[in-house]
Image (cartoon, helix red, strand yellow):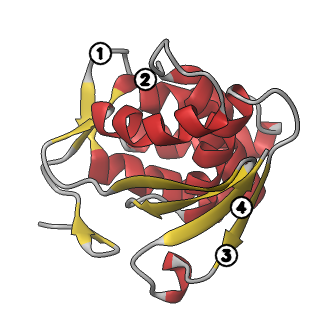
Amino acid sequence: MSVPRGDRPVTEIEVTGEWVRAVAAGVEKFSADSRESALIVLEEADLAGAEPGEWYSLAGYVDAVAAIHDLVGDQAVHALGQRIARAVPFPDDIEGVPDALVALDEVYRAGHRGGDVGGYDFRQIGEDDGRVECRTPYPCAFDRGIVEGAAVAHADGFVCVCEIGACRTDGADRCTYEVSW
C-alpha cells in the first residue's frame, strides 16, 4: 500500500540509520513522559535500535516523526530536525552557510534511496540571506529544523529561519524558508 506524503508516495523508499538515530538521540532529551511516549512510537515502528549504514522504511520513519509531532508539537520536532545537521556528514569543503544550504539537497539524497524523495533547493538572494524550498515528506517543523541546523552548523554567528509563502500544512507542494545569517 502506498502511503502518500504530499504529492510523493514513500513506499519502497528507505532512509539511512544515521537519520533515524538522530531522531532517536533527540528523543532521549525530551522530558520523561514525552521521552517514554516517543520511544514507544520508535519501537512500534521498529526504529528504536537503528544502526548506521543500515536502511529503514521511509514510510515508517515519516509516520513515526509525525506521531512524535502529535505528541510533543512543533518546537520539539523542530529541535529533532536540527540534530540532523550534527548527525549526518556534510562535504568537507563547505565554507559557510550558502555552501551548506546548497549541499543540503545532496546530503538529504545520500540519506534516502528507492525513489523520488523530493529535496531542498537553495537560492542565495543577498550577501547574507537566501531561500530554501523544501519538497520532502517530513512535517514542516522537522524540515525547518533541518534547514536551521545546517545553517547554524556552518555559520559564523546569528542565523534566522522564517517560513514565507505557501506551506505544505495548507496544501501547498512545498514550504519555503527565508534564511539570513
Secondary structure category for the residue under label 4:
helix
Q: Residue at x 67, y 75 (%)?
A: 164
Q: Is residue 55 above or below residue 61?
A: above
**Residue 164 numbered mark, or none:** 3
CA distance separating discs 4 and 2: 22 Å
Q: Check whether the beta carbons of the residues at disc 1 and disc 2 lie within 8 A of each other.
A: yes
- The number of numbered discs placed on residues in the rendered structure image is 4
CA distance separating discs 1 and 2: 7 Å
**Residue type, mark 1 in image:** Gly
* Residue ranking furthest to the bottom: 170
CA distance separating discs 3 and 4: 17 Å
Q: Earlier in the sequence, mark 4 or mark 2?
A: 2
Quarter holding the N terminus? bottom left
Q: Earlier in the sequence, mark 1 or mark 2?
A: 2
Identify residue for label 4.
74
Identify residue for label 1.
53
On screen, residue 161 versus residue 166, left or right, reads right
Q: Earlier in the sequence, mark 4 or mark 1?
A: 1
Please state which of residues 158 and 24 is positioned toward the viewer in this rendering. 158
Please state which of residues 59 and 43 is positioned toward the viewer in this rendering. 59
